[in-house]
Image (tube, grey):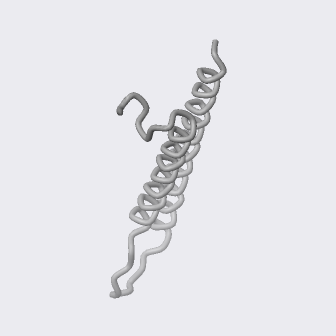
């Protein structure tokens, strides 16, 4: 097996582990929020940002950074942003 193939397999496995970790963190944050919401009811009339939206935006930002790192890695290894396209 060529060194490039080993490197690409390594990158894919690291990305898969990171996605699994972030998904579990998202689940835990949602469970923590739902438990707190049941225990404490707010009577404020001010508009509050929902915790699910904050968690979703955080997760979206993390995945965007993974994509950016993948694009930089692809450019450094192949010289192309999307390998295979001219």
Q: Is residue 81 left or right of residue 25?
A: left
Direction bottom: furthest residue? 45
Q: Position of residue 73 (x, y in %)?
A: 56, 41
Residue at 39% in and 74% down? 49
- In the rendered image of this protein, does residue 8 appear above or below residue 62? above
Q: Position of residue 39 (x, y in %)?
A: 50, 68
Q: Position of residue 53 (x, y in %)?
A: 39, 64
Q: Quadrant of the C terminus?
A: top left
Q: Position of residue 38 (x, y in %)?
A: 45, 65
Q: Quadrant of the N terminus?
A: top right
Residue at 42% in and 61% down? 57
Camera-nearest residue between 40 and 6: 6
- In the rendered image of this protein, does residue 68 appear above or below residue 78? below
Camera-nearest residue between 53 and 39: 53
- In the rendered image of this protein, does residue 31 appear above or below residue 70? below
Camera-nearest residue between 12 and 27: 12
How many callouts does the rendering have?
A: 0
- Residue 5, located in which quarter of the rendered image? top right
């Amino acid at each position: 097996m060529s060194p490039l193939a080993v490197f690409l397999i390594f990158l894919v496995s690291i990305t898969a582990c990171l996605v699994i970790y972030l998904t579990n963190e998202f689940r835990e944050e949602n469970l923590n929020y739902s438990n707190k919401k049941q225990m404490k009811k707010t009577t404020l009339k001010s508009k509050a940002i929902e915790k699910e939206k904050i968690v979703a935006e955080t997760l979206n930002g993390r995945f965007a950074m993974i994509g950016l790192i993948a694009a930089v890695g692809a450019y450094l290894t192949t010289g192309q942003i999307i390998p295979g396209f001219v």
